[in-house]
């Protein structure tokens, strides 16, 4: 059976569609998730960003902080392509207002349960599927 340490390389791949990776990293590697969120923020707000504030009605950071979802668009809104991991983590209570991963024992248990629920059928079983 694979473990999280076997899948460490998956955390920064932009095309990962398995949302279970976000709460799974929060439960097992919160520091790595925080680094991934910073990378996404830098990529989407930096000077080479193609994010269009006019199209979305607000800056990327504003939408991540205040909206429940991004408006439908063909523009990449985050490293998840059609979703921003920062926004998903905020909306689902994985991070606090400063985008730091919540780290209490109860929170980590909740993140493991979320990862199990969101794990795609085509994803190999790993420690996320174990209590």
Image (spheres, rainbow, N blue to C red):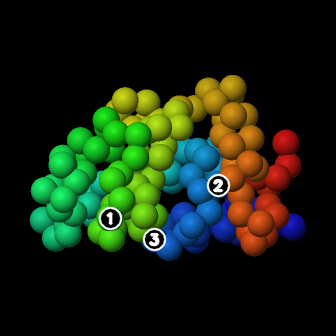
Q: Give the SS element for disc 3.
A: loop
Residue under pointer 2? 20
**Disc 1 crowd, CA 10 A, few/some/many (<14, 14-19, 20+):** few
Q: Residue at x 12, y 65 (%)?
A: 47
Q: Residue at x 65, y 54 (%)?
A: 20
Q: Classify residue 29 as left or right of residue 65.
A: right
Q: CA distance from mark 2 to mark 3?
A: 14 Å
The mark closer to the camera, 1 or 3, is 1
- Residue pushed farthest front? 72
> Which is nearer the eye, 79 or 66?
66
Q: Give the SS element for disc 2.
A: loop
Q: Are marks 1 and 3 in contact (CB under 8 Å)?
A: no
Which is more N-terminal, label 3 or label 1? Answer: 3
**Disc 3 crowd, CA 10 A, few/some/many (<14, 14-19, 20+):** few
Dividing the picture into quadrants, the one containing residue 90 is top left
Q: Classify residue 58 as left or right of residue 81.
A: left
Mark number, residue 97: none
The mark closer to the camera, 2 or 1, is 1
Q: Residue at x 71, y 63 (%)?
A: 120
Mark number, residue 14: 3
Q: Is residue 68 visible?
A: yes
Position in image of residue 12 (x %, y %): 48, 67
Position in image of residue 115 (x %, y %): 69, 49
Mark number, residue 73: 1
Q: Are marks 2 and 1 in contact (CB under 8 Å)?
A: no
Q: CA distance from mark 1 to mark 3?
A: 18 Å
Q: Give the SS element for disc 1.
A: loop
Which is more N-terminal, label 1 or label 2? Answer: 2
Position in image of residue 62 (x %, y %): 23, 41
Q: Quadrant of the N terminus?
A: bottom right
**Disc 2 crowd, CA 10 A, few/some/many (<14, 14-19, 20+):** many
């Amino acid at each position: 059976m694979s473990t999280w340490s076997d899948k460490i390389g998956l955390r920064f791949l932009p095309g990962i569609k398995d949302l279970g990776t976000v709460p799974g990293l929060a439960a097992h590697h919160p520091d790595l998730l925080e680094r991934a969120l910073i990378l996404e923020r830098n990529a989407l707000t930096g000077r080479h960003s193609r994010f269009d504030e006019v199209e979305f009605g607000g800056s990327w950071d504003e939408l991540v902080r205040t909206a429940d979802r991004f408006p439908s668009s063909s523009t990449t809104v985050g490293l998840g392509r059609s979703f921003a991991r920062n926004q998903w983590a905020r909306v689902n209570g994985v991070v606090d207002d400063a985008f730091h991963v919540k780290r209490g024992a109860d929170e980590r248990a909740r993140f493991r349960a979320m990862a199990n629920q969101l794990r795609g059928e085509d994803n190999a079983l790993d420690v996320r599927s174990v209590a």
